[in-house]
Amino acid sequence: MSKNLQLVSRFALPPNFLGYCGKDSAPAKFKRCVIGGECQEIEKEISKFIGLYPYLKTISAITNLPIFSYEVIESYWLGNDQLKKAKVEDYQLLLENLEKQGVPGFLIEELKQKKPKVFIPNHLFQVLHVGVGRVSGSVPFNLDSINNCMIRWGKVEKIVGPKAQISLNSLKEEGLGYQLTVRGCSVPFDKSFVPGLQIGHIVAVHWNLVVKILTKKEEEKLSFWTKETLRLLF
C-alpha cells in the first residue's frame, strides 16, 4: 500500500505545506511516507482535503476500485485509462462529493450551471473547470495560480545548489482557453524527496517544488491527459 500512499503524498505535500489544502498536521507525515515508507496516517490526512478527496471518491465509484488504490490516485494526478470510464453524468456525483466535503453552496450552485461537455475527473479539470483556489478561497484564480497548481513536467537542464533549471510544460492563455507552452523555470527540490535527481531527468512540479522523477510511461500519461483535458474543455 505504501507505493499508493507515497504517490498521493508527493503531490499533496506542496499545497498542504503552503496552507492551501488539508490540515497543518500533514506535511511531516507526507515527508515520512515518501522518504521512509511510514504511511499509516496518510489516508486520514487526505480525507481532510476539500478538493482532492471528493475526486478520489468519485473516481473510485466510477471505476469500482478502492479510493486509495494506485490506479485511482494516478488517474487523478497524472492520468491513466481509468479516466475513460467517466461519463458526463458522473459530474453530478463529483458535485455531491464536493458538497459533502464542505465546499461552499454558492460554488456548488455555480458549478451546476456550467456542466461540462465532457467530464474528466483529473487534477487539471479541477484547476481549470472548478477553478484553482475557488474551493478553499486560498489563492486568486489567475494564470500564475493555474500554472503553480497544475502538474507541470519537463526536462532538468541544469542543477545549481538546491534548485533545478527545468524546461517546464506550462499554460498560456489562448482565446477563451489555454495552450501548452514551454517555460524555463528555476525550481527548488529536496534531495531526500527526489534522491538521485540529475540533468536530463523528466520531472513533475507542483506548487514550485520538484515532486517526482517521472518514468517514460508516467510522462506519456501526463502529457496525453493534459492535452486531452485542454482539447475537450475548450
Image: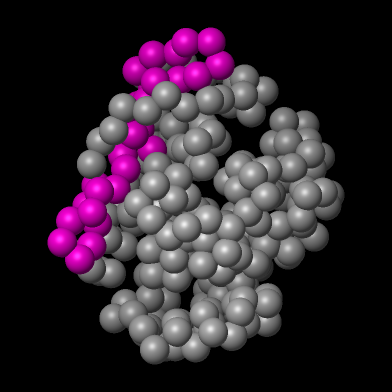
Location of residue 91 with respect to 15 vertically, above or below: below
**Among all residues in the image, which is located at the extreme left?**
175
Does residue 145 appear in the picture of this structure? yes
| Image point (40%, 42%), residue name | 152
Q: Is residue 228 magenta?
A: no
Above or below — where is 114 with respect to 145? below
Residue 167 x/y as whole percent: 31, 28
Q: Position of residue 116 (x, y in %)?
A: 33, 80
Question: Whole-percent x and y of residue 74?
Answer: 52, 54
Instruction: Work out whether 37 lies above or below 151.
Output: above
Q: Quadrant of the C terminus?
A: bottom left
Q: Which residues are magenta?
A: 153-180
Principal SS element in the magenta part?
Answer: strand
Identified at 79% across, 43% down, the residue is 29
Q: Given the current orientation, which residue lies at the most extreme front position? A: 140
Q: Position of residue 115 (x, y in %)?
A: 37, 84
Q: Nearer the viewer, residue 177 or 138?
A: 138
Quadrant of the image occupied by residue 56:
bottom right
- At horizontal 47% and vertical 58% (from top left) the residue drawn is 140
Q: Is residue 165 magenta?
A: yes
Q: Residue at x 31, y 62 (%)?
A: 229
Q: In which image quadrant can residue 88 be found? A: bottom left
